[in-house]
Every structure is written in structure tokens, then in C-alpha cells.
């Protein structure tokens, strides 16, 4: 039997979903918790069973918050991207202060500025890692 199945392209593989915002429907019904889009409340995004321990409701509320959470993450990601260049400039200035202190023979000052430089380098590394991780999770 011959089929016409083809592997999905990367673009086809990307999740397509109902745009947010979504909301958790209070008192959905006796058996399930519903998550619905604000734009079309007659549609159910998902539903979870009604458990007695509250986990299913918590999961439904978490799912309902997903579009807003993604939007907030994107805002923070943009802010982090905006921080990289100024931090690199600051790192360069700190290195200059350390070199100037060494040139002037002030070892204590040189040590102080070298320590600040290492802190800034560590911070910029963490920011770059966070950006890379967020971007890879976004694909």
C-alpha cells in the first residue's frame, strides 16, 4: 500500500494555536475544567478532569495563563537583549580602569576593578545563556 505521507517541514512542525488571551472557566462542569479563548468563549482550548486534590484545576489555570506568560517572557527577553551592549561597554570601561590602576602602581585599585570586571563578565555570560535558552525553547 502506497501512502502520500511526507515528513513535515520545520515550518509545518511549529505549533499553531489559538491566540490568547485565554481564561479558566470557573465552575466548568461537574467533570472537567475548561480553558477558553477570550475571543471565542464558545471554543474549548483544553479541558482537564475534575480531581479532588486541586492539581487538575491548577493545571488548567496554568494552561490558561500560557499566552500571557509567553508575552511577559518575550518582554523580558527583549529587555535582556537591550542590556547586552551596554554591559559589554561597561566591561570595557572596567578593564580600562584596572589597566590604568596597574599603570599608576595602585594594586588595590587594580584588584578592585578586576573583581568588578569579572562580575560583569559573569553577568553578561548569564544573560547571553538565558537569551539563547529562551530562543531555543521558542522554536
Image: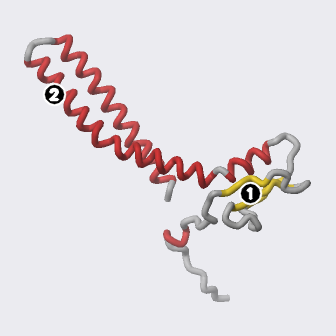
Q: Which mark lies nearer to you, 2 or 1?
A: 1
Q: Which mark is residue 68?
A: none
For label 2, count other residues whose C-alpha is less than 10 Å away and answer few (under 14), some (14-19) or many (20+): some
Q: Earlier in the sequence, mark 2 or mark 1?
A: 1
The answer to whether 25 appears left or right of 122 in the picture is: right
Helix, strand or loop under label 1: strand
**Nearest the eye: 47 or 79:** 79
Residue sitting at x 53%, y 48%: 72
Q: Distance between the residues labelled 2 and 1?
A: 55 Å
Look at the image and name its color scheme. secondary structure
- Quarter of the image where the N terminus is located: bottom right
In the displayed structure, would residue 136 be above or below residue 85? below
Horizontal and vertical percent for residue 73? Answer: 51, 47
Residue beneath label 1, please? 35
**Nearest the eye: 121 or 27:** 27
Residue sitting at x 63%, y 86%: 3
Amino acid at each position: 500500500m502506497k501512502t502520500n505521507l511526507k515528513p513535515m517541514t520545520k515550518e509545518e512542525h511549529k505549533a499553531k494555536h489559538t491566540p490568547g488571551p485565554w481564561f479558566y472557566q470557573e465552575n466548568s462542569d461537574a467533570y472537567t475544567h475548561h480553558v477558553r479563548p477570550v475571543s471565542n468563549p464558545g471554543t474549548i482550548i483544553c479541558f482537564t478532569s475534575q480531581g479532588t486534590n486541586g492539581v487538575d484545576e491548577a493545571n488548567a489555570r496554568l494552561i490558561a495563563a500560557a499566552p500571557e506568560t509567553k508575552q511577559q517572557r518575550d518582554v523580558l527577553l527583549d529587555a535582556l537583549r537591550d542590556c547586552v551592549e551596554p554591559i559589554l561597554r561597561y566591561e570595557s570601561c572596567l578593564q580600562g580602569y584596572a589597566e590604568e590602576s596597574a599603570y599608576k602602581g595602585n594594586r588595590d585599585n587594580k584588584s578592585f576593578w578586576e573583581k568588578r570586571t569579572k562580575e560583569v563578565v559573569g553577568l553578561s555570560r548569564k544573560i547571553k545563556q538565558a537569551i539563547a535558552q529562551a530562543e531555543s525553547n521558542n522554536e
